[in-house]
Each structure stands twice: as structure tokens, then as C-alpha cells.
Amino acid sequence: MTARHHELTDLYGTELELFTIWMKNRGMTKATQQAYGGDVQSFLNAVYPNAIGQLGKMDVMRYLAAAREKGAGDEARNRKLSAIRAFFKALIEMEAANSNPAALVAKSKQEKNRIPVYLEENELNELLQSVQGKFYSRNVAIVLLMAYAGLRVGEVHRMNISDLRPDGAIHILGKGRKWRVIPLPNAIHEVLRKALEERLTSRQGKDQPFFVSQFGRRLSIRMIQTVADRTIEQLKLERPALADKPLSSHKLRHSFATMQIRSGTDIRTLQELLGHASIETTQIYTHIDNKQLQTAMDNIAVKLPGRLLAREFSSEL
């Protein structure tokens, strides 16, 4: 540990411990706790050695401005702000602070309706053919769940054996600790059953994780990302046209949503399948397909008067 880390712990250790307790009691995932904890420690490092009670709105804004100068975009800035807000909210609830200096700091306006990056259906088919690795059945199941069921990496990580039901549905613990049920096609259910048959014995007692590492532990988020990313890299080797496309494990979820929209799935149903709290988050996928726009306008084209284009217009108009 660095000298500065010890200094931060000495000065803010109690507050950081209270924040950790608060996050656990709120049911936040380990990944969220780590992300929020890292952002808060970065903030405290910037305001050191000021006491928590002395911090104000300008301290928060100064830190966020410095983060932007170092290259943080709108999304990263807003995430840092959310972490700091949560930190002071926790301290207020734990009676360790009287005010939240981050509460009145405005979030950055992010670009709306950004077109997501995704793979076409034929490219997804080729992606499955690109799966490799010693634990082949496990890796295929992981890629299938992200690309053909829309699961987040963290959701794949949290899956237990009991979440796969006899009727083929899976019960998924998503963001905000909200459960959703996804009825899987028979083909995916069969792949999951095969992965389960070949699964190594877990050493984790009561909770039996669905995906297990070679050491018998729950497969980590990092390893799940690695499985997806290696498969994507293999696909790029086979499809050089995709070499410059910014693909990642999360883009498989985008690909699933794109397929659903193109198949005619309504926005509310897609919201449920993806586990989005707000339909605004889901609506980004209604702007992805120019072919649908073209089809809509072609429907208008056949209704235009037949002699419209043949009419001669005066140049004086």
C-alpha cells in the first residue's frame, strides 16, 4: 500500500467503512461496490486533507472538472458524480454527515439515441462458430446467454444452478436486485443442460454457481468478459471487415436487442427482456435500422399520385 493510501485510511477510514456497510445493506452488487468505492476514494484523494464536514459543492465540481481534463467523458463524469452523491447520502443516513454537497451538482447531458454497436444475425452465427477453449460447452453457453438472451456480464456471473428451471426458463437477478424471467428457446436450454453436465464441482457450498472456474470457484466477471472478447477476436480474424468495429462483450447484448426489434418485438416486451428500469433506455434500439425507415417510406411511395413526377413545373415557381 502507498503512503497516501494509509493517509486516506487514517483520515477517512470511518466514513469509507460506513459507506461500505451502507452499500451492502442496500443490496448493491460487489461490482457496484467496487466501482463506487474506487470513485469515492479518488474524490477523497483529490480533497485530502480536508475534513468531510468542510467539503462543499465547489470541491465536487473542482474534482469533476479535473476528471474531465484527464479525459473522462460525460458518462464517466456522471458515474463519478453518482458515486459521490451516494457516499454523502450514506453518511447522512448513518448520522456521520449533515449535508450532501454533491446533491445540487448537475449531471452532464449525454448524447441521446446514440446508435449502438452490434453484430448482424449472420455475424452472430459465425461468432458461435468462433468459440474455442478447454471448457468449450461452458464458453458456448456464456456467449449464447449474452448474444441470444441479452444477459449482462454481471448477470451471467451471478447465475446459480437453481436459476435454470425445468420448464426451460431462467430467473435472472439484474440491476437494482430485480428479478426477471426469460423463457429460453429449447436449443439454448439444451446447451445450458450440456454445460451443466460438464461443469466442474463447485467448492462454494450453499450457493451453487452455474459457471465455475477450473479452480472450482464462481467464474469471475473478468473471465466471462475474456471468454466473450476472445471469441470476438477470433471472429475478427475470420472476418477482417469487422477488424475496426468496436465490439465487446456488452455489444452482444446490443445485438440481441437489435434482433428483437427487427423481428417485430414491441418496445415494452423488449424492456422486460433486457431488464431496463426505464423504457427510455430501451428506446435507443428503435433507431438502429435504416431498413425499417426505408420500408416505412416505401409504403408511402405507392400512395403518391401516378402523374406527380411527370408534371412539368414552371421554372418561375
Image: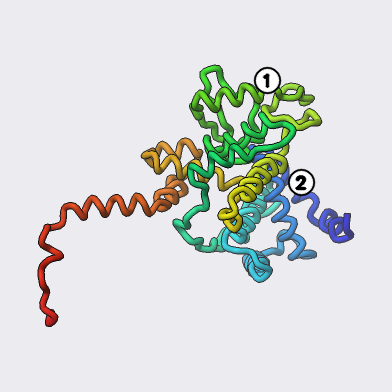
Q: Is residue 303 visible?
A: yes
User: Which is more toward the observer, 1 or 50?
Assistant: 1
Q: Position of residue 181 (x, y in %)?
A: 51, 28
Dot 1: within a 10 Å radius of its alpha carbon, few (fewer than 14), some, or many (20 or more) residues?
Answer: few
Q: Position of residue 159 (x, y in %)?
A: 63, 30
Front disc: 1 or 2: 1
Q: Which residue is mark 1?
A: 197
Of residues 124 and 53, the one nearer the viewer is 124
| 10 lies above or below 227 | below
* Picture quarter with the C terminus: bottom left
Q: How many neighbours does mark 2 have within 10 angstroms: few (below 14), some (14-19), or many (20 or more)?
A: few
Tag 2: residue type? Glu
The quadrant in which residue 143 appears is top right
Task: Give the mark, 1 or 2, whose residue is nearer the N terminus.
Answer: 2
The label number, if any, that marks residue 17 in the structure image: 2
Q: Position of residue 5 (x, y in %)?
A: 84, 57
Nearer to me, 203 or 307: 307
Residue drawn at 47 percent across, 43 percent down: 257
> Label 1 sits on what residue type?
Glu
Residue 301 image position (x, y, % from top left): 21, 55
Work out which residue is located at the far bottom of the displayed protein and give it. 316
**What residue is rendered at 47% in x and 48% in y?**
281
Q: Which residue occupies 45% across, 46% down?
A: 282
- The residue lying at 50 percent from left, 39 percent from top is 274
Does residue 277 appear anywhere in the picture?
no
